[in-house]
Image (spheres, rainbow, N blue to C red):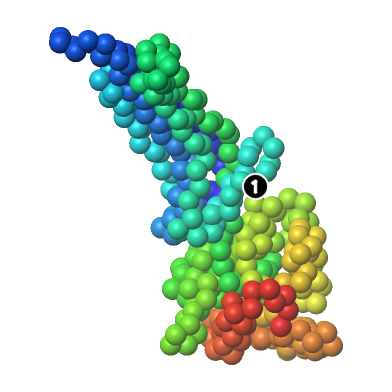
Amino acid sequence: MFVDQVRIFVKAGSGGNGACSFRREKYVPRGGPDGGDGGNGGSVILQPSHRLTTLLDLRYQQEYRAEPGRPGEGSNRHGKTAPDVVISVPVGTLVMDDESGEVLADLTDENHTYVAARGGRGGRGNAQFATSTNQTPTHCQPGQPGEERWLRLELKLLADVGLVGLPNAGKSTLIAAVSAARPKIADYPFTTLIPNLGVVQWDEEHNFVVADIPGLIEGAHEGKGLGHQFLRHVERTSLLLYLVDISEWATDDPVETFLTLRREIETYDRTLKKRPFAVAATKMDIQGDGRRLDDLRTFCKKRRIRLFPISAATREGLEELIRFLGKQVLSLRQTPCASNY
């Protein structure tokens, strides 16, 4: 099961109370205050990890509470600080306040942690309040309460290339042919119910990550089909590859198919309109008389859109496509502000 959106409650531990105590020992007159400070409460921390690919574990445990700090004691003994609670989440997790919708953190790096709820500070004992004019303070501080809040976590996959197409366009077959990923492949719509990631090696030194986004249909931006559930993963990709089925068995016009995909992507997020893209005409091995490919090729040529006729089954055209995608990804990595090629 792939889970990419969850709601959790986090509560940090409160700080321990400071102690109000006086030193009382035989032969030690006027021993003075010796109340120790309370310990700090534990915090709740989100730790991104490449080893996780889903938020599934957080669906079954929605509450995370850290322990409070221990109170201070006499003889200047400070209370023990409570341990932090660390929650592992996949890299690419977006953290939002559930009530306001404010984005609190974008965990795109494994070394980037986020303190979701900070533990309360321990209170000061009365020994901290002793002065030359008040040598016997009788007050101490209570520990501060820990933070608590409801969070909404969303996972947006990090990939260099996003494969976009209608159901049964050949996305799963393509990602299986160019990488070690083994997605489910079948001849019925919506075979892919979860995004799949594959690493493509395109020369001895470079590789890039491809995301197989589950099939879109017209109206996906309104939630139809798999809708918003997986369109959010397109936002993270730096390059889009539209897959259009040009086989003799396909019923949709290939040009209209491409235009439909573009409309759905751009309507969902207008910034994606400037995202670099290319088109792959899939299932070349069963193209029939080739009229569908000719129509799509003529359309792309007029608009100067890069078109790659391919067959994942026979590997026809894959080397040229992989080389093109690799060079584009490398260029985009070197110039991250580039919006076209």
**What is the secondary structure assignment of the residue under circle 1?**
strand
Q: Is residue 211 above or below residue 299?
A: above
User: Residue at (44%, 73%) from the top-left corner?
Assistant: 180
Would residue 222 be found to the left or right of residue 287 on screen? right
- 151 relative to 90 in the view: left or right: right
- Label 1 neighbourhood size at 10 Å, few (<14), some (14-19), many (20+)? some
Q: Nearer the viewer, residue 59 or 48?
A: 48
Q: Relative to residue 318, is residue 32 drawn left or right?
A: left
Q: Which residue is mark 1?
A: 103
**Residue sitting at 27 percent across and 24 percent down?**
77
Q: Is residue 109 visible?
A: yes
Residue 19 coordinates in the image, percent (x, y): 35, 17
As drawn, 302 above or below 4? below
Give above or below for 313 relative to 165.
below
Question: Which residue is at 70% across, 77% downward?
Answer: 338
Of residues 324 and 109, the one drawn nearer to the viewer in this rendering: 109
Horizontally, residue 15 falls left or right of residue 261, namely: left
Q: Which residue corresponds to the image point at 51% horizontal and 47% vertical from the top-left?
A: 114
The C terminus is located in which quarter? bottom right
Q: Does residue 68 appear anywhere in the picture?
A: no
